[in-house]
Structure formats: C-alpha cells, structure tokens
Amino acid sequence: MNLESSGILEVKNLCFSYRGGFELSLARLTFAGGVCCLLGPNGAGKSTFIRLLTTSVMIPRGVIFFEGRDVRDDLRSYRRQLGYLPQRFGMVNNYRVSEMLEYVSWMKGVPKKARSEAIERAAQQCDVTRFLTHRISALSGGTLRRVGIAQAIVNSPKILILDEPTAGLDMVQQSQLYSVVKSLSRESVILVATHSSSDVAEMSSQLVILNEGSTVYSGAVDDLSTHGGASRREGIEIGYRAVVAAKPDVSL
C-alpha cells in the first residue's frame, strides 16, 4: 500500500500493556476512507485502541500513520484533524451549547471567521440548532449525545472516531445519525466503536473485530455476514459470534 495516499490511517505493530497483564497487540490495520465499525466483547481492547488513535495515551510501541506520516511527528496537526465522541461525553455544565461548540472549534483550529458557519452546519446536521442557547446541564441524555456528535464534526475532521454514538438515541435520531455519518464518510476516515449490529448494518461496509487484545477479523461486513441469517443484521450477529468462538457471554 502507498502510504503517500491521502486519507489513509494505518496502524503497524501497535502494542500497549497494562500492569495487570492485558496486552493489546495489533500487527497491521488500514482504514482508507468510508465507515469501519469496531466490535469486540467487553475487555477486548477497543477502548485502549481508541485512546491510542486519539493520542489520549501515548504510543509505547509501534506506529500510527496518517497520510503517510507518523502522527507523533506533528501531534498538534493530527489532533486538529480528529473528531472524537467518547463513550461518556460531558462538558462544563454551565456552558451553553453554542459556547461549547465555539470552544471546541477554537481548540481544533477552525479560523475565527469560519466558526459561526461551522457551528451552524454541525448543529443542523445533528438536529440540535434549537438547543444552541440551552445550557449543557439542562439537556436530556439523547440531546447531549447529539451535541457530542456535533462537537466531534464541527471542525470537518479528516478522521472521525465515534464511541457508541447511538447510545441514548431513539429510532428517528439513529436514522439521522446514520445519514450524517454516511455523508461525512465521502471525505473522512470514520471509525465507529459499537455493540449494535444495527449500527454495523446501516452504516458500515468494513469491520474490525478485536478479542483478547488481538484482531480476529478485519474485512468486509458482507464477507462476515455470509454465515447466514434472515437479514443482514442477523447475519452479522451470527458471523460475529463465530469469529469470537461463540462464547456464552459475548453478544452484540
């Protein structure tokens, strides 16, 4: 693969160990645009992998490349090209939504003259325009989740990482999110960590499954779902269980 290609995120020989003995060890993964879902049972290493990709913890061994460069060569530039929604999203409660989005856009290096437009666009895409004057503390769980997605895309990121983005959203809001993510995937590398087979079926063409710190599947969603099932979603669930050895406590 040509690492000079634009929009390619690649992981090579990435390792991270905890004192308790758990080790994440990923030989090679490539994300080249579009939407890729990240699955795995609890404790598989998904959260650790996300923390490494977002550089919230530093890389002890191995390399993360973006557009052909080791991200450690210019962390500030890499972080400004990232959008991230953590599993537990929160901000200063007395901020208004507009103030929070203004702050994030400033942190991400959005030019001052472009911030108002960027905030309006992100708020509209996530259906939170009517909440811009509301304080964070007054938002419901579902609305806070959508605001979290808005802050993740306010800088039009080249890499968007969403951790359980549909948690707390109703069916209509989930459908809106799927549309936003698929629209953004035309120009961004998007990684979605999820436990929902519906998220995979609706958003993703590629899939990475981790188990016990290693990659047990990396490839097309449709190749995994050929194990059978009445629907694409059911086929994904059957294929998922097969590659993680059908452990009784493993489910999507």
Image (cartoon, rainbow, N blue to C red):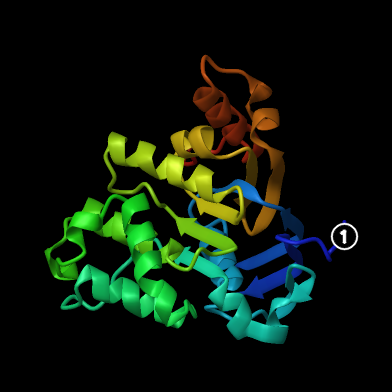
Q: Residue furthest left?
A: 138
Residue 159 image position (x, y, % from top left): 58, 62
Q: Can you say whether 156 is above or below 126 in the image?
A: below
Q: Which amino acid does label 1 sit on?
A: Asn
Residue 114's x, y, as percent?
43, 73
In which image quadrant can residue 45 be found? bottom right
List x then y, in percent, for residue 87: 39, 61
The residue at the far top in this view is 230
Percent x, y of residue 105: 41, 75
Quadrant hosting residue 120: bottom left
Taking the image as shown, residue 93 lies to the left or right of residue 227, namely: left
- In this view of the protein, can residue 85 be seen by the observer? no
Residue at x 55%, y 72% (from the top left corner): 54
Q: Residue at x 29, y 35 (%)?
A: 172
Density class for disc 1 (Cα within 10 Å; few <14, some 14-19, many ≥20) is few
Residue at the spot 52% in from the left edge and 60% down from the top edge:
161
